[in-house]
Amino acid sequence: MEKDTLTAIGTRIAEIRRHHKITQECLADSLGVSPKHMSHVENATSSFSLKNLIQFCTIFGCSLDYIIFGKQNDEALSKLPYEIVKILNTGSNDDIDRLNRYLQVYIELQDNQD
């Protein structure tokens, strides 16, 4: 894998982990890898196995598309601004709840215009 790709993947993994306030050690334990390997993944000197990537996505409720490509490959989601996709994939429950409230207000405003 290219260094740029590993760097981008490691950055997204670290970003999601930090947003959820989980240490490298705790996440490494959950994934069954060493803390050193966890650090290497985030610093782009190593990579997770596919099994570990899937476990990571399951733990944090994010998509593999986001981790690998930095975007959603879902047609509808790909039309959203990057910042919203980022919140959906890296945000805490509070961030997602806040986004949902904003969207609900938008829907209500749209309904009032009809």
Image: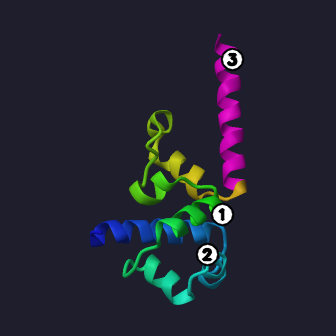
What residue is drawn where x is 29% and y is 73%?
A: 3
- Amino acid at dot 1: Ile
* Rendered-image quadrant of the N terminus: bottom left
Q: Which mark is residue 31?
A: 2
Vertical relation: 90 (above or below) 85: below
Q: Nearer the viewer, residue 97 or 6?
A: 6
- Amino acid at dot 3: Asp
Which percent across, then down, holds residue 90?
58, 58
Q: Is residue 111 left or right of residue 68?
A: right
Foreground mark, 2 or 3? 2
Q: Main secondary structure of the magenta part?
A: helix
Q: Which residue is mark 1?
A: 59
Q: Residue furthest left?
A: 2
The quadrant where residue 24 appears: bottom right
Q: Is residue 105 magenta?
A: yes
Contact between marks 2 and 1 (CB within 8 A): the answer is: yes
